[in-house]
């Protein structure tokens, strides 16, 4: 009887251990497919104006972290980005001026219903720290001996805008004569100013908040009646291979969560 009792106890213990082992195995089951992030393993190409590099880098990083998507970004001048769009290598098109988006809409390169205004782009005059030429307004850009850097009218949006501003002010011939360099991106204009290679340039106001500009330049506002304030839109390319992901990103950078980021980098977000 004692042997039978011991045998029964051993069997009970064995069953208990086996049960414990099953429980442990269930706890170590790999995470299910349903727990993956929404767009994990899916890719997107964003074509963005170079002047948006600071907020866009942060927005992309946040979007990737939240959704698991892999976002490649190509920065450049608006005309260059338009070329990339037409070559069908772009999912999201974000030029520095609505002019280029309108062209894309007219030529059916983007889904018109996807076009959403992100923020305003405000042109300003940037001069090196201490303002050696004592520039106080647009008219001073026409003074003899002033060295200017301007965006190429056929390159970044700021180039076409600067030309229009100077033409409106009646100083375009003098400004063109004073221009010693034309750049393919607005970022290059900032470099020319902070390195004291030029006396002034027309850039976007938000760039004054960049670390590269800190303590190295001064900003001179252009009166509203003389200025050409632009709107930056975003749109989904008709050539995108992943419309769902493209739409999600397009909505994200125009949404409430993104507004704080735009404001942080000196932009004024649009309401719609």
Image (spheres, grey):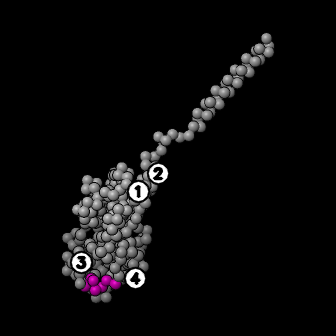
Q: Tag 3, which secondary structure?
A: helix
Q: Which mark is residue 166?
A: 3
Q: Residues within 10 Å of mark 4 (few under 14, many from 20)?
A: some
- Classify the position of the N terminus by image quarter: top right
Question: In the rendered structure, which disc, 4 or 3, sits on the residue that comes first in sequence?
Answer: 3
Range covered by the magenta-colored residues? 174-180
Q: Give how far apart the Cα atoms at labels 1 and 3 are.
A: 38 Å
Q: Are marks 1 and 3 in contact (CB under 8 Å)?
A: no
**In the drawing, what numbered circle is on residue 44?**
1
- Name the mark nearer the viewer: 4 or 2: 2
What residue would you read off at disc 2? 41
Q: Earlier in the sequence, mark 1 or mark 3?
A: 1
Relative placement, left or right, of 97 versus 225 is right
Q: Which mark is residue 197?
A: 4
Which quarter of the figure is the C terminus placed in? bottom left
**Label 2 secondary element:** loop
Q: Are marks 2 and 3 in contact (CB under 8 Å)?
A: no
Q: Secondary structure at mark 4?
A: loop
Q: For the residues marked 2 and 1, what is the alpha-carbon distance in whole angstroms?
A: 10 Å
In the figure, 28 relative to 148: above or below?
Answer: above
Q: Which callout, 2 or 3, points at the residue further toward the start of the chain?
A: 2
Prevailing secondary structure of the magenta residues? helix
What is the x, y in percent for residue 127? 35, 77
């Amino acid at each position: 009887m004692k042997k039978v009792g011991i045998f029964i106890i051993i069997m009970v213990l064995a069953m208990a251990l086996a049960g414990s082992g099953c429980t442990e195995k269930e706890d170590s089951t790999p995470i299910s497919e349903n727990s993956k992030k929404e767009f994990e393993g899916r890719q997107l190409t964003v074509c963005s104006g170079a002047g948006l590099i600071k907020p866009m880098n942060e927005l992309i990083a946040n979007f990737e972290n939240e959704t698991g998507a892999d976002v490649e970004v190509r920065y450049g001048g608006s005309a260059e980005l338009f070329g990339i769009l037409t070559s069908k290598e772009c999912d999201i098109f974000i030029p520095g001026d609505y002019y280029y988006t309108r062209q894309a809409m007219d030529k059916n390169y983007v889904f018109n219903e996807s076009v959403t205004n992100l923020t305003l782009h405000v042109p300003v005059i940037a001069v090196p720290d201490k303002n050696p030429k004592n520039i106080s307004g647009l008219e001073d850009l026409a003074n003899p001996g002033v060295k200017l850097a301007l965006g190429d009218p056929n390159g970044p949006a700021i180039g076409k805008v600067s030309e229009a501003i100077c033409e409106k002010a009646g100083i375009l011939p003098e400004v063109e004569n004073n221009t010693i360099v034309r750049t393919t991106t607005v970022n290059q204009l900032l470099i020319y100013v902070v390195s004291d290679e030029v006396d002034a340039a027309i850039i976007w106001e938000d760039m004054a908040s960049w670390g590269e500009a800190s303590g190295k330049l001064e900003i001179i506002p252009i009166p509203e009646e003389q200025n050409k304030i632009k709107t930056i839109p975003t749109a989904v390319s008709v050539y995108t291979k992943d419309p769902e992901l493209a739409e999600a990103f397009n909505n994200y950078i125009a949404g409430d969560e993104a507004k704080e980021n735009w404001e942080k980098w000196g932009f004024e977000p649009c309401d719609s």
